[in-house]
């Protein structure tokens, strides 16, 4: 797979960008990231009113230690720790939710990997529960097209749906299009494999010109369906890879959450539209006047 | 001629006949109305008008014609060895060819009605569906089917059944260099066009996602603004509330100041009347002040609750408007995508049609007959009842 080699590009770009712009050392860069992390989780919970870091004066020489000052300092420390704990808990909660959402995708995309009967194969490619306009709008081999998942990420980033830091970053401008391109190449490879089955292996079916001389018809069909199953599994893996890449590798925690919200929201909107559209259109029909003479319906 | 323009010069007399005509017109109107209602019912419940037919019906009918009439006729003509059989075979080949062309043209018409349903056809069975590319047979299939005869011609034994037409048996024995070159040319063209069509379908989806994502971001962005707006409104409410409190405090103070001389007078009176009476007046004053305080707190609570409710109503209304706008955007963008997909689907059908016609243009009548017979048999095979029944019951796992 080409993917792993391209993954670090994102982080690399991010790092280079910060170093170039700020011209600061590694330690400064690390501090900046740490600061980002806190700001991210802050946006999730109630905003902390005062964000400026207060510079506490050190005890001056000759000043006496007082019980009062110590007590004040301790109370401040406890307050700060409580605030930090609150932010951490919020962060863990978001982490948990993101992981839960990813697990749902894993479960959904792994449907193709679990043993399937011959007649269920059609459900993987054209699920009955998904209206045909929704499939036409977004699907490739039964579910979201992997490159479209990253397309969505790219355009959401450009449309300022995410935090301010992301749209300008080099990762979105350079690395993401590269990843989308790679996904498109892999989709094309899978398309070719599927085309080979649909145009060549199909001839080995029991009624085809290249039918196997020996063996039962169902065994022959099973052999061809197994090939399709392998292709579908590859497609599902690619989808999952795209989703994990978007959520885990490209985006920060808050942006990942925002992306998942947008993903679910857009899918729901498309589903609603598709259901309504199918209901309004009814079964696909043809105008009888438009049919030529000699047509079976005339 | 007639002065009263716009009036009927010969108004019909109000007779029994007229009443009868009026009645019959009324009955006719009612009948027409019921017909309209019925057709509306049909349209609403079955989704198609009287002048249109479901594509599924067309396909079933088309398939029956292929299986029960055209394929049998072609086979009979192929096995006949009479002298006039070549002309007959040529006509059957042409009829079969036209039958396929008619199917693809009708598919195009159906696509303009709803491309999504022809891309994911529910008239195809579960056995056929995994083998569909853009709603129908893959264009490579025609070429590969043809190549299977060219490959077979080299391996076939020379056993000849006397019942068969000698020309048909020998059709693919030595296809010739010209034919194989032509097949290579068609395949080269297909190898360029098929991925291009797949890319167009992919780009249409990407364009949809781009537009919807941009609108989503815009709405979310506006949401951020409104969030800011809420904060501002909250701050404004707070300021107003503060000002109102201050004003209230001032008036209370003025009232207090005004009351103070009276209180002093009272106190003086009290001093005169005696300590016990003074204590009583003081207690009454404190009670009054406490009551005032409680009333103020209640008012503050009511104002805050009202402001909160107002904010909630505004937020819900804004959320509703945002969702409505997104729905509109999805509908419009999806319509644009469907239009593009109609183009892709029609081009895919054009490709299928042109490959089929090309094949029939450079093959002789016997080769064409063998090819079309195999193609028709292929389609019929997918709908073989016995095989389908086995397929549905099959417990083999993948």
Image: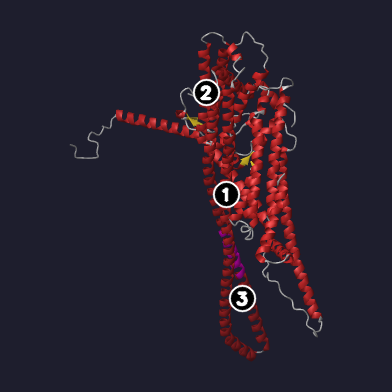
> In this figure, which residue is indicated by the disc labeled 1?
B210
Q: Is residue B53 left or right of residue A51?
A: left
Q: Residue at x 56, y 71 (%)?
A: B240
Is B301 inside the magenta-drawn segment? yes
B333 vs B230: above or below: above
Asked if labels 3 and 2 share a chain, the reply is yes
The chain that hosts pointer 2 is B
Percent x, y of residue B95: 51, 20
- Residues shaded magenta: B300-314
Q: Is residue A281 left or right of residue A8?
A: left
Question: In percent of the image, x 75 and y 28: which residue is there?
Answer: B396
- Magenta-highlighted stretch: main secondary structure? helix
Residue A143 in which image quadrant:
top right
> Mark 1 vs mark 3: same chain?
yes
Q: Which residue is mark 2?
A: B361
Who comes first in sequence, dot 3 or dot 2?
Answer: 3
Mark toward the start of the polypeptide (1 vs 2):
1
Colouring convention used in this rendered image of the protein: secondary structure
Categorize mark 3 by other alpha carbons within 10 Å: few (<14), some (14-19), many (20+). few
Residue A142 visible to an observer of this rendering? no
| A250 shown above or below B43 | below
Q: Are marks 1 and 2 in contact (CB under 8 Å)?
A: no
Q: Secondary structure at mark 3?
A: helix
Q: Quadrant of the C terminus of chain B?
A: top right
Q: Earlier in the sequence, mark 1 or mark 3?
A: 1
**Can residue B373 be found in the magenta stretch?**
no
* Disc 3 and disc 2 in contact, CB within 8 angstroms: no
């Amino acid at each position: 797979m080409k993917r792993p080699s391209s993954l670090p590009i994102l982080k690399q770009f991010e790092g280079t960008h910060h170093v170039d712009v700020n011209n600061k050392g590694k330690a400064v860069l690390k501090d900046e990231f740490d600061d980002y992390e806190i700001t991210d989780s802050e946006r999730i919970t109630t905003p902390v009113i005062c964000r400026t870091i207060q510079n506490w004066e050190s005890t001056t020489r000759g000043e006496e230690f007082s019980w009062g000052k110590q007590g004040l300092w301790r109370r401040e420390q406890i307050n700060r720790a409580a605030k930090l704990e609150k932010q951490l808990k919020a962060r863990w909660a978001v982490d948990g939710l993101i992981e839960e959402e990813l697990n749902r995708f894993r479960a959904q995309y792994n449907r193709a990997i679990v043993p399937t009967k011959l007649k269920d194969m059609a459900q993987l490619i054209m699920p009955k529960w998904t209206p045909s306009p929704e499939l036409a709008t977004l699907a490739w081999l039964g579910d979201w097209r992997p490159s479209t998942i990253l397309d969505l990420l790219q355009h959401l980033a450009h449309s300022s749906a995410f935090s301010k830091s992301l749209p300008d970053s080099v990762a979105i401008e350079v690395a993401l299009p590269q990843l989308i391109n790679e996904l498109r190449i892999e989709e094309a490879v899978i398309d070719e494999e599927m085309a080979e089955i649909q145009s060549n292996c199909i001839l080995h079916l029991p009624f085809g010109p290249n039918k196997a001389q020996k063996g039962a018809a169902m065994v022959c069909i099973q052999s061809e369906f197994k090939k399709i199953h392998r292709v579908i599994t590859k497609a599902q893996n690619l989808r999952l890879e795209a989703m994990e890449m978007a959520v885990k590798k490209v985006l920060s925690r808050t942006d990942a959450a925002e992306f998942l919200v947008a993903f679910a929201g857009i899918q729901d909107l498309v589903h609603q539209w598709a259901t309504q559209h199918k209901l309004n259109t009814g079964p696909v029909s043809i105008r009888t006047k438009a049919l030529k003479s000699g047509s079976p319906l005339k | 001629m007639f002065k009263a323009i716009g009036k009927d010069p010969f108004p019909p007399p109000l007779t029994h006949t007229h009443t009868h005509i009026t009645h019959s017109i009324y009955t006719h109107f009612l009948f027409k109305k019921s017909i309209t209602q019925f057709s509306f019912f049909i349209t609403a419940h079955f989704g198609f008008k009287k002048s249109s037919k479901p594509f599924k019906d067309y396909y079933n009918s088309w398939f029956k014609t292929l299986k029960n009439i055209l394929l049998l006729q072609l086979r009979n003509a192929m096995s006949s060895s009479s002298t006039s059989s070549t002309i007959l075979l040529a006509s059957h080949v042409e009829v079969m060819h036209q039958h396929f062309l008619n199917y693809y043209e009708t598919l195009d018409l159906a696509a303009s009605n709803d491309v999504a349903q022809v891309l994911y056809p529910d008239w195809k069975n579960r056995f056929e569906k995994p083998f569909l590319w853009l709603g129908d047979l893959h264009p490579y299939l025609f070429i590969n089917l043809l190549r299977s005869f060219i490959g077979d011609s080299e391996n076939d034994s020379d056993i000849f059944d006397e019942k068969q037409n000698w020309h048909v048996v020998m059709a693919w024995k030595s296809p010739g260099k010209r034919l194989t070159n032509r097949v290579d040319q068609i395949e080269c063209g297909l190898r360029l066009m098929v991925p291009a069509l797949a890319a167009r379908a992919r780009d249409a989806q990407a364009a949809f996602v781009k537009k919807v994502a941009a609108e989503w971001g815009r709405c979310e962005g506006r949401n951020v603004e409104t969030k800011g707006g809420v904060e501002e409104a909250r701050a404004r409410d707070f300021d107003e509330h503060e000002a109102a409190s201050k004003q209230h405090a001032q008036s209370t103070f003025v009232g207090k100041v005004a009351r103070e001389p009276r209180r002093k007078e009272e106190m003086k009176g009290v001093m005169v009347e005696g300590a016990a009476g003074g204590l009583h007046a003081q207690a009454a004053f404190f009670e009054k002040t406490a009551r005032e305080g409680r009333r103020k707190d209640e008012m503050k609570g009511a104002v805050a609750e009202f402001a909160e409710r107002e904010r909630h109503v505004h937020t819900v209304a804004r959320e509703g408007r945002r969702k409505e706008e997104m729905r509109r955007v999805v509908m419009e963008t999806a319509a644009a995508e469907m239009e593009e997909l109609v183009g892709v689907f029609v081009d895919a059908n054009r490709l299928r049609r042109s490959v089929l016609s090309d094949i029939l243009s450079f093959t002789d009548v016997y080769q064409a007959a063998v090819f079309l017979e195999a193609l028709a048999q292929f389609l019929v095979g997918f709908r073989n009842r016995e095989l389908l029944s086995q397929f549905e019951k099959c417990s083999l796992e993948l």
